Amino acid sequence: MSDQTITWRQAASHAAEVLERADCEPNPDMVLAKVAIAEGWTQLAAALSEIEHT
């Protein structure tokens, strides 16, 4: 395992990128999967933001 750090801004950016790809996805099941992944990134961004601001 590597020692990588991610900021809340990076996590939010990943969420946005995944949602952009979901918007172009023709397969409805893949859209749902990508939205779920984006929601995970969004939750991570929120948690990291809270940690960084405490």
Image (spheres, helix red, strand yellow):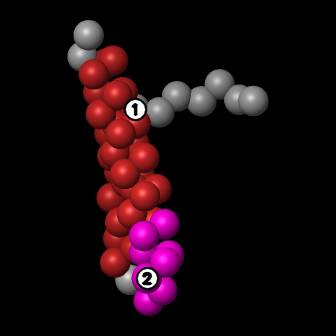
Neighbour tally class for label 2: few under 14, some 14-19, many 20 plus, Cα within 10 Å? few
User: Mark 2 falls on what kind of element?
Assistant: helix
User: Can you say whether 40 is above or below 3 in the image?
Assistant: below
Q: Quadrant of residue 22?
A: bottom left
User: Can you say whether 19 is above or below 3 in the image?
Assistant: below
Residue underneath mark 2 = 28
Q: Counting residues from the N terminus, which is met first, the one under dot 1 or under dot 2?
A: 1
| Residue 48, position as x, y percentages in the image | 36, 27
Is 47 left, or right, of 4 in this rendering? left
Position of the N terminus by quadrant: top right
Q: Quadrant of residue 32?
A: bottom left
| Residue 45, position as x, y percentages in the image | 34, 37
| Residue 28, position as x, y percentages in the image | 43, 82
Residue 42: in magenta span = no
- Say which amino acid is labelled 2: Pro
Q: Give the extent of the magenta segment.
A: 26-33
Residue mark closest to the camera, 1 vs 2: 2
Give the number of the disc on residue 7.
1
Position of the C terminus by quadrant: top left
Principal SS element in the magenta part? helix
